[in-house]
Image: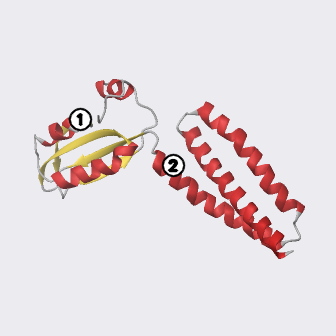
Amino acid sequence: MMHNSFMMVAIILIINIVYVSFFTIRMILTLKGRRYLAASLSTIEVVIYVLGLGLVLKNLNEIQNLIAYAVGYGIGVIVGMKIEEKLALGYITVNVITKEYDKDLPGILREKGYGVTNWEANGLEGDRMAMQILTPRKFELRLYDTIKNLDPKAFIISYEPKSIHGGFWVKTVKRGKLFS
């Protein structure tokens, strides 16, 4: 009897981890505009959901099943987020303000494959250089490290653009020639 109870808890836990991971990834794909992939994933997701919920509802008198369902949900959120971090879909725009105006810095970043637009800026303490840099999200941390190595005092802020249109860099990315 105890063995069956443990197996049921383990099955419910695993099913919910998988379900919520799929749910998280589907939501991210939907937000990124990958509607057909998101729709395909949701088909699998709903089957997993119905199986897990069915097991819990059939055995509602067993509190450990409900606890397994809730714990699986929480773990599934974390697993889904970790998977999304590894996939790193989309692009990131990074705004950088350097401590001093360094005319070589944009060129160094461009040589590394980043799309850089730069201009002269003025801050409280004098002349600065402002740069707007576009990169695939999977290279985001590498970009931060590069900037910090070149200018440890640089001010960095980033955001995720909803859409990108035009420019030489977009064509380069679509042809798969970036960061080779």
Q: Is residue 172 left or right of residue 85?
A: left
Quarter assignment of residue 67: bottom right
Give how far across and how far down residue 17 sits, in percent: 66, 58
* Marked residue nearer the N-terminal end (1 or 2): 2
Residue at x-position 25% and y-position 36%:
113
The N terminus is located in which quarter? bottom right
* Residue to which mark 1 is pinned: 117
Give residue 13's position: percent from left, percent from top: 71, 63
Q: Is residue 113 above or below residue 83?
A: above
Q: Quadrant of the C terminus?
A: top left
Instruction: Name the residue tied to disc 2.
Output: 84
Task: Say if mark 1 contacts mark 2, CB within 8 Å.
Answer: no
Q: As shown in the figure, which amino acid type bears the numbered disc 1?
A: Thr
Location of residue 92 (image quadrant): top left
From the viewer's perspective, is residue 122 above or below residue 112? below
Q: Is residue 36 left or right of 150 when viewed as pictured?
A: right
**In the picture shown, does residue 169 fall above or below 155?**
above
Q: Residues within 10 Å of mark 2 (few under 14, many from 20)?
A: some
Looking at the rendered structure, the kind of residue marked 2 is Glu
Total label count? 2
